[in-house]
Image (cartoon, grey):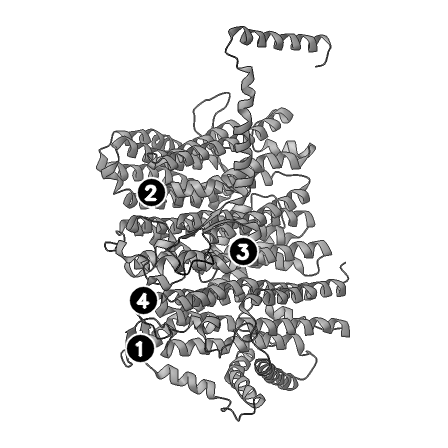
Amino acid sequence: MISIVLMVITALFFPGVIVKSKAKFSGRKGPGIFQPWFDIARLLRKGNVFSNASSYVFQISSSVYLAAVFTALLFIPFENLGPLISFTGDFVLFAYLMALGRFIIVASALDVSSGFEGMGANREVLYGLLVEPAFFILIGSLAMFTGHASFASIFQGLHYTSYFSAVIGVLAAFTFSQITLVESSRLPVDDPLTHLELTMVHEVMVLDHSGFDLGIIKVANNLKFAIYGMLSANCLIPHELDFWVRIVIYFVLQVGLAVAIGFIESFRARNKMAMNPQYILSISAIATILIFVVIIINNNL
Amino acid sequence: MHAILFKVAFVLSLGIFFVPKSWKQFFAFAVSLLLGITSVVWAVNVLMSGQTMVIDLGIPFWKENPALTIDSLSAFFILLIDFICLTGLLYGWGYLKPYFEKKSAITLSLHLFSFIWLHASMLQVVTMRHGISFLISWEMMSLSSFLLVIFEGEKEATLKTGINYLIQMHVGFFLILGGFLTVFHATGELTFDALAGYFSNHNNFWLFLLFFMGFGIKAGFVPMHSWLPHAHTAAPSHVSGVMSGIMIKMGIYGIIRVLFQVQADVYGIGLFLTVIAIITAITGILYAIFQHDIKKILAYSSIENIGITGIGLGAFMLGKHLNKPELMTLGIAGALFHTMNHALYKSMLFYSAGNIYYATHTRDQNLLGGLIKKMPFTGMSFLVGSIAICAIPPFNGFISEFLIYSGTFQTIGKASFSESLISIGIILCLVLIGGLSVYAFSKAFGLTFLGSRRFPENSKTETEVPLLMRISSYVIITAMMLVAIFPYFFLQVVAKAVAVVPDSRIAPILAENSHALQTIGHVNLILISVFALIYSLRSLRKNKIDIQFKPTWGCGYSAGDFRHQYTSTSFNDSLRQLADGVLMIERKLEPLTEVEIFPAQRSFSTETKDLIEEKVVLKPVNRLIKELPKAGWAQTGYIHHYLLYPLVFLLIIGLLTFLNVF
């Protein structure tokens, strides 16, 4: 339960911190931390404009997306404090729930008969195809390291006996945060603030979503940040510490991640679209290094 | 008692030729239902009691009495065969309606007769253990499916495809025959059970390879898959549904029977099977993405799913060798579970593709689009099938892939170097296959059913198909939902089938993992209820707020039409740039010249050829066709020469005998 509370709190401030830090880096004052949520609240009250070409798939898409992300949220533990749902191999279900979200948003994008959204849908399935292996290699190497096969037991068993094994935690956290960038469509893979439809990935797919639909898609995106943020934090925080200390470290890490995203988005440009597949594949490559680190540490070679 | 019913069904099937035209469908369904009920009773009995049942058919034939031997593995397959054949025939009832005006009574009778015989012969294939009767049933299956494929034989292409199918099936037949004869030569027995005796004191790999090639042609393992996309496209949709849903699984059944007997060389066989299966799955789904014809997409995706089943079987063998009971148990359980899942959603997807063809008379994605607005129910079943086939919850496809994943993830911890590499390899391939199938099916569903209709001038009369053609899909969706919500129950059925393997480690592992499956069932329910909650919240606001329908956003340009949408070719393009090396895509485009200031109208077309078919099948065959006439020099046309040939032959034989060469 505690993990869900933590993630919901994170989802509340995470997007705001990104926006705030971007504003600070560019020398502006910036909106308040909760402004993104006020925007969502406004969207939820607004009316809808639907495309003439759309069908019932478009109508259900946003609800399916939020339902999938919300259900995936129930699987994430906070360290050794178990999640609501846990069983052997639960991360497979987690990954496929994320795939459900991707599938339905892609379908809704294709539903409005737009060239832009077809382009976004096409990129999204390609990037999804490329980023999923990274997640599974990462989880696979953690399973190899701990000898367990569920989120809860993996993070419970993630003890670093030496400085060498702490490398695993750092590498894993880094890979998770890279996956966050791809899954949440941030720089350098995708630029959420771009004003050119031709260069968008996620944003272009929801161009024709409006009002309530757009609002809950944004809610789901914020929850996604929190989910991957929690996964990264779980790789880093040592178990031995006091509960409250760990909570503090958790929030420091989340704010740090948000500021880091803001930093990246302030100081670097988006990749060329043709570069993106290579960039995403490099995440899998880093995850593969992790496998070999684990094999060496486990003395299996 | 029941054996008589089984035989009566065979005799009754002849009656189809004498029934009036309007009653033929009903009669065929009744006969199939008789076969179905009889065999389901047997299967349920076997599954409940756990004991093997032997039913003597009482027809003495060539030194043996053909008997139906039903163990729990056969029973599992019997249930699948009956379910798919009956829903297929029900769908065909509606699908064939327009053909009843065009086709002669004898053609239709032959078609329905073959359908019943396909049903009956598959039941025999999974129950007959004696080599000769098994091979006869196998041949019956190939012949009846051949007749079903060439239903529209007046088209030359269909007939050619049918003959291609027939030839490839016979190559497979002779390979299996060769396998049985090898066993017969060594042990003096001609049954599946004699395989164990052969395997215990001979090299296991080569005989397995012989059987694998024979059964693999039917199943569609790469590189023996080339008949599959052609035959499934040429056959009418209810036939493709049944062929892809269950007939190709007979190959899997044969491989499982052989695998269960293997004694030694387990590692080599397991590795071989896994590698071939991975190649099959990735090739299948990659080619599926690059097709424009909906039925071809589905056919290539069947190859992919055969590959996933094969990965499960490979994991079973590898786990057996490495002494990893989790990998072994969940591998075989996953393979059998996947056989069931794929039978369900793939037959339904083929029926939906049939509905599209029925309504629009085309299967080309580049001519379709926006069908969901005219055919909401067909669209819904295709959407459900697409989500299920990508192994995405909350449908049944996830359960079987989860079992295989879970087996590998439980093995990976504290494993040795090679074991970790094998596990991570299997996981990586499954993930890649999963990602590619999302690509393939978001395209298959999205470009056919969503967006706006391409070339709307052709689409004036398109409407949803009649209820008779949709019932089968509803029945299958219900079954899929049952599997998704109560996976534990179905795991128990699969566990009964797996119990054929005499290994005491299997049952406890399945019991351990049943908790996971129960939880997945609950998660599926949670997912559906969360969705229902959000959606009803959304609906509640509907009458309070302002809802408008406007043109799609196009940077302010609102006169866009269907040409703005992505096409099948453009949707593929990003992947084509990455995977160009392993594909054979012909792009026909006349490039612009520098002097051309006002370009004239041009056409652009792409065609994806099956690289493996071209290199493995067509190239050697074409070479053979070119070289064989050279042997014609011996055909001089003079009778003297023809008399000389046997004389020379006899002389050589005599000489060799004299010299004691033999």
Quarter occupied by residue B405:
bottom right
Q: Disc 4 versus disc 2: distance between alpha carbons?
A: 36 Å
| Crowd band around label 2 with a 10 angstrom C-alpha radius: few (<14), some (14–19), many (20+) | many
- Residue placed furthest toward the bottom: A29
Residue A53 bears which disc, if any?
A: 4
Say which of marks 1 and 4 sits in front: 4
SS at mark 3 in the image? helix
User: Cβ–Cβ below 8 Å for labels 3 and 1?
Assistant: no
Q: Which residue is mark 3?
A: B433
Q: Which residue is mark 1?
A: B540
Quadrant location, the C terminus of chain A: bottom right
Establish if B582 lies above or below B183. below
Labels 4 and 2 share a subunit = no
Q: Position of residue A152 (x, y in %)?
A: 60, 70
Q: Chain of mark 1?
A: B
* Type of the residue with mark 4: Ala
Labels 4 and 3 share a subunit = no
* Type of the residue with mark 2: Leu
* Type of the residue with mark 3: Ile
Establish if A83 lies above or below B331. below
Q: Which residue is mark 2?
A: B89
Q: Chain of mark 4?
A: A
Q: Chain of mark 2?
A: B
